[in-house]
């Protein structure tokens, strides 16, 4: 149930919501957007043996403040976002800055399915079969210059489509960043779908970042722009609460969020909490990126 | 004085009044409110049975119970101002029930955290209590509410004596403030709801403060008007 609605309508509304009146009409009134499947993608060995989180849970339990604060608000407001036509521009320190039409970009990239664990900073997790392509493939096309050290990402700014941008919770648009070597890591992908289907709006359509060894908030949604930079870019949550959200934000059970523990997590759909793994279990692949760094300082 | 005596003479004996008049608070308002207070719980039970609590039903349960604990606590604090504003004394007969419902939801909220969320992982719970200030505040609020719930019966009012009992039950103010703080410290960035509840609490406490200052002013004025202390 929406806590905002509960507030907006006062006690009477609260009682109605608590009684279950109204909460059922929500699901009925905003029928799912038409779902279309990708014709071609290759499966990859990632995530073999993982139990996939339900499509329903993945698409109704979202942190996407631009579409509302409650976990179910993004799904409810998903229709406001128009993911086509869409242009993704790449600029900054690169030899061939470019603007890509989303469909042309997708058509030009061989798509893969990557089954990844997603660990939210709020101590819950999911397993999602993403459809996408390596971020490195896009970076290769624009040919980063030698002095490029970082990639900055930016979400669409349009309060009509993303009404959450009207309230000053974060500084909009949402921005994120990776070190260039992180961005080039084969695990980092740009995702354009999940469960073999085109990305649902509430999950960050039409194109979003997935960096599975970092907390979910690094995996910025509905991207319109990438910029190659020499200096470390600002990131939205770091700007809002620097002590709570670092630039790196690698999943790390040894470094607690100042306000809650990161040692264990609840896998959505399971009753018992499970232990959180360093780098979300991708340590073998990515730990080398941080050799010699004190991960308590660089959280 | 004459007037007062005349009125008394006209009014029939008290017992007769009680027999004739329908006890609307006891017969209607209280049972209705009792049922209303059970609705959030019923709705949660219904949600568990039908799987309609979303992708994370445990979080939804803890939160819904916490929300109602706090909202009912604030509603309890609104009873006295409501009487003062409307002059309807019947509303006072709802206060104990509201307070006990607030406490019951707090107990269920804490149980939901200990059982559903942490499943008795006492080391993790203890770490939460000492390291997470929002949990520390929640526990402090809960511990303050506990003696109030225990001494809520008429027996305890008699045993303690009304002045002591009243003073003890002023613990409800810090308890409510700690609960609001607990809520405020928990959220990431969406402070809207905790702010609304904090404003409600400020209003309820501000009302009492003003009333107390006024009473004090009046006593002082009266004391000045009668310097010798004689009426
Ligand atoms: C030992 C005492 C307590 C503990 C351990 C505790 C624990 C928690 C936890 C873990 C949450 C976050 C739930 C989640 O996000 O999954 C929470 C939220 C909350 N708690 Fe408590 N709590 C305690 C006492 C109280 C008391 C006494 C009240 C009110 C009278 C209260 C009111 C709330 C409220 C209003 C929320 C926010 C719910 C929301 O976000 O909608 N808590 N509490």
Image: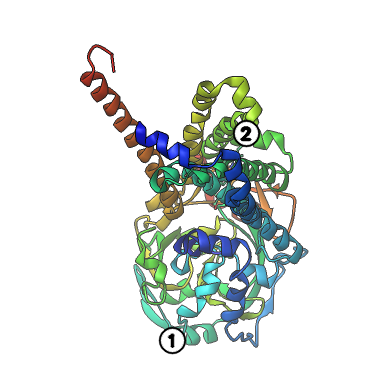
Residue B42 drawn at (x, y percent): 69, 58
State the CA–CA distance, disc 2 to disc 1.
60 Å
For label 1, the residue is: A85
- Asked if residue A24 lies left or right of residue B74, the reply is right
For label 2, the residue is: B149
Residue A52 drawn at (x, y percent): 72, 67
Quadrant of the snapshot with the N terminus of chain A: bottom right
> Tag 2, which chain?
B
Residue for point 60% across, 43% down = B16
Ligand 1 lies in quarter: top right
Residue for point 74% across, 66% down = B50
Q: Nearer the viewer, mark 2 or mark 1?
A: 2
Pick the front one: A126 or A272: A272
- Residue A210, relative to residue A86: is it above or below? above
SS of the residue under disc 1: loop
Say if residue B161 shows up in the picture.
yes
State whether label 2 is within 8 Å of ligand 1.
Answer: no
Pick the front one: A192 or A186: A192
Other residues around mark 2 within 10 Å, as few (<14) / some (14–19) / many (≥20): some
Say if residue A207 shows up in the picture.
no
Q: Are marks 2 and 1 in contact (CB under 8 Å)?
A: no
């Amino acid at each position: 149930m929406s806590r905002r609605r509960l507030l907006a309508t006062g006690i009477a509304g609260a009682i109605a919501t608590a009684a279950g009146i109204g909460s059922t009409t929500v699901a009925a009134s905003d029928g799912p957007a038409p779902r279309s499947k990708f014709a071609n993608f290759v499966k990859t060995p990632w995530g073999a043996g993982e139990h996939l989180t339900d499509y329903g849970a993945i698409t109704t339990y979202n942190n996407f403040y631009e579409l509302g604060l409650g976990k179910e608000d993004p799904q409810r407001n998903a229709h406001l976002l128009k993911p086509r036509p869409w242009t993704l521009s790449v600029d900054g320190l690169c030899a061939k800055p470019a603007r890509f039409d989303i469909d042309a970009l997708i058509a030009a990239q061989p798509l893969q399915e990557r089954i990844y664990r997603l660990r939210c900073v709020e101590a819950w997790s999911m397993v999602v079969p993403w459809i996408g392509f390596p971020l490195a493939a896009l970076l290769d096309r624009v040919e980063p210059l030698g002095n490029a050290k970082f990639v900055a990402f930016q979400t669409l700014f349009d309060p009509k489509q993303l009404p959450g941008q009207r309230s000053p919770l974060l500084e909009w648009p949402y921005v994120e960043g990776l070190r260039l070597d992180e961005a080039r890591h084969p695990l980092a992908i740009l995702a354009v779908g999940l469960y073999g289907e085109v990305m649902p709006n509430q999950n960050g359509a039409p194109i979003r970042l997935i960096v599975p060894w970092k907390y979910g908030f690094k995996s910025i949604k509905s991207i319109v722009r990438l910029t190659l930079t020499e200096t470390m870019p600002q990131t939205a949550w770091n700007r809002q609460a620097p002590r709570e959200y670092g630039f790196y934000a690698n999943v790390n059970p040894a470094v607690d969020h100042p306000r809650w523990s990161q040692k264990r997590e609840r896998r959505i759909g399971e009753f018992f909490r499970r232990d959180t793994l360093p780098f979300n279990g991708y340590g073998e692949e990515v730990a080398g990126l941080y050799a010699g760094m004190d991960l308590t300082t660089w959280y | 004085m004459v007037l007062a005596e005349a009125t008394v003479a006209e009014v029939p004996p008290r017992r007769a009044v009680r027999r004739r008049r329908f006890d609307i608070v006891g017969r209607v308002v209280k049972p209705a409110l009792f049922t209303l207070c059970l609705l959030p719980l019923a709705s949660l039970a219904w949600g568990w049975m039908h799987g309609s609590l979303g992708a994370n039903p445990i979080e939804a349960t803890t939160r819904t119970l916490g929300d109602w604990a706090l909202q009912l606590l604030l509603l309890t604090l609104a009873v006295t101002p409501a009487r003062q504003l409307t002059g309807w004394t019947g509303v006072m007969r709802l206060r104990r029930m509201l307070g006990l419902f607030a406490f019951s939801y707090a107990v269920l909220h804490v149980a939901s955290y200990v059982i559903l969320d942490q499943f008795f992982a006492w080391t993790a719970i203890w770490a939460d209590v000492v390291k997470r200030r929002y949990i520390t505040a929640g526990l402090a609020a809960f511990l303050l509410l506990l003696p109030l719930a225990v001494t809520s019966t008429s027996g305890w009012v008699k045993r303690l004596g009304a002045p002591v009992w009243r003073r003890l039950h002023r613990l409800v103010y810090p308890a409510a403030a700690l609960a609001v703080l607990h809520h405020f410290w928990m959220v990431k960035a969406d402070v809207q709801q905790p702010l609304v509840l904090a404003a409600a609490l400020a209003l309820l406490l501000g009302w009492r403060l003003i009333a107390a200052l006024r009473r004090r002013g009046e006593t002082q004025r009266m004391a000045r008007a009668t310097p010798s202390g004689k009426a």
